[in-house]
């Protein structure tokens, strides 16, 4: 199994791009750390109860907690040709944990795709973001509106604003990205696996650029 990491700031479009890539190629599997955590919070698992407070503040959950969730999932997976990791790793410690998981699964790191988006655009994207309360599909009020206002195209579920998409928390998440996640750019660049993809412009074009970078 190949592992592809999608790297980028909150609002850079990792989830949207991953969703499109997977819809077009059934041999891919999308794993979103944020979604895994939101599920855990919603179902009040032990991990979810621990993660909840960090997420509300826009901070990262502890490395060991998310590394364990992803490792457990990867150990169970069989079938996908490639895994698109969206939102994990987010720190160098997590990247090192992922290296060990990849090795123990007999997988290999195929590429790290960095979605590059200027800060002013990130803020606007986060502010307009909506999420399906049933299937988790992502929308944006102006850039990617649903066909019917407030309703998910895919499943008919009601759209909602994510709890941590308020301006204060979003600002904190951007700061956390800069200090804790950006060091991963150099970490993977040094290994020769980093592919930079401009994350602005029409969504279809961004997805196509990302597809070519896989
Ligand atoms: P975004 O990329 O827009 O910030 P995510 O859905 O990826 O949104 O993450 C939402 C929240 O979940 C983060 O702010 C953080 O609290 C938590 N989280 C997700 N992935 C990780 C991770 N790899 N390490 C630590 N915390 C994480
Ligand atoms: Zn839906």
Image (spheres, helix red, strand yellow):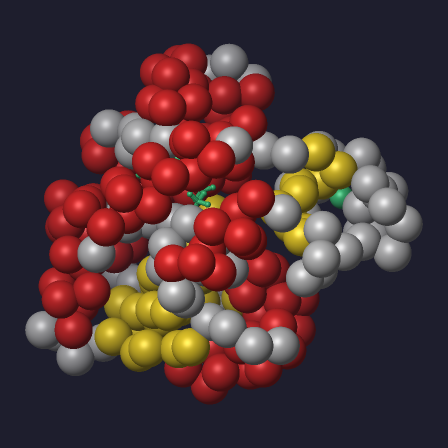
4 left or right of 138? left
x and y percent of residue 8 in the render? 36, 59
Which quadrant holds the N terminus? Answer: bottom left
Counting from the top left corner in percent of width and height, residue 84 is at: 44, 61
Q: Nearer the viewer, residue 154 or 178?
A: 178
**Residue furthest front in the image:** 120
Identify the image quadrant of residue 162: top right
- Does residue 101 appear in the picture of this structure? no
Q: Is residue 158 above or below residue 203?
A: above
Q: Position of residue 197 (x, y in %)?
A: 39, 77
The front one of 186 and 85 is 186
Judge whether residue 93 can be spotted in this image.
Answer: yes
Q: Which image quadrant is residue 120 in?
A: bottom left
Q: Is residue 101 left or right of residue 139?
A: left
Residue for point 55% across, 65% down: 17
Instruction: Residue at the far left: name it.
Output: 190
Q: As drawn, which residue projects farthest toward the bottom?
A: 212
Task: Determine the residue positioned at 13% across, 66% down.
Answer: 186
Q: Position of residue 210 (x, y in %)?
A: 47, 77
Q: Nearer the viewer, residue 73 or 207?
A: 207
State how many labels appear.
0
Q: Is 37 drawn above or below residue 7 in the view shown?
A: above
Query: Which image quadrant shows ligand 2?
Result: top right
Determine whether 153 is above or below 54 in the image.
below
Residue at the image position 55 percent from the left and 53 percent from the top: 125
Q: Nearer the viewer, residue 77 or 23?
A: 23
């Amino acid at each position: 199994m190949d592992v592809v990491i999608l790297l980028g700031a909150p609002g850079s479009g990792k989830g949207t791009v991953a969703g499109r890539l997977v819809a077009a190629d059934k041999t891919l599997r999308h794993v979103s750390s944020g979604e895994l955590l939101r599920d855990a919070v919603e179902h009040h698992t032990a991990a979810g109860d621990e993660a909840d407070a960090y997420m509300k503040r826009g901070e990262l959950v502890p490395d060991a907690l998310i590394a364990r969730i992803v490792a457990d999932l990867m150990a169970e997976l069989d079938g996908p040709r490639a895994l698109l990791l969206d939102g994990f790793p987010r720190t160098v410690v997590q990247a090192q944990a992922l290296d060990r998981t990849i090795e123990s699964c007999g997988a290999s790191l195929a590429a790290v795709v960095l979605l590059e988006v200027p800060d002013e655009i990130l803020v606007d994207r986060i502010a307009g973001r909506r999420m399906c309360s049933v299937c988790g599909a992502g929308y944006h009020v102006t850039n990617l509106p649903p066909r019917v206002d407030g309703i998910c195209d895919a499943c008919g579920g009601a759209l909602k604003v994510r709890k941590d998409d308020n301006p204060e928390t979003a600002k904190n998440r951007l700061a956390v990205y800069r200090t804790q996640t950006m060091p991963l750019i150099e970490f993977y660049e040094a290994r020769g696996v980093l592919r930079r993809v401009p994350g602005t412009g029409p969504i279809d074009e961004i997805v196509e650029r990302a597809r070519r970078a896989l």
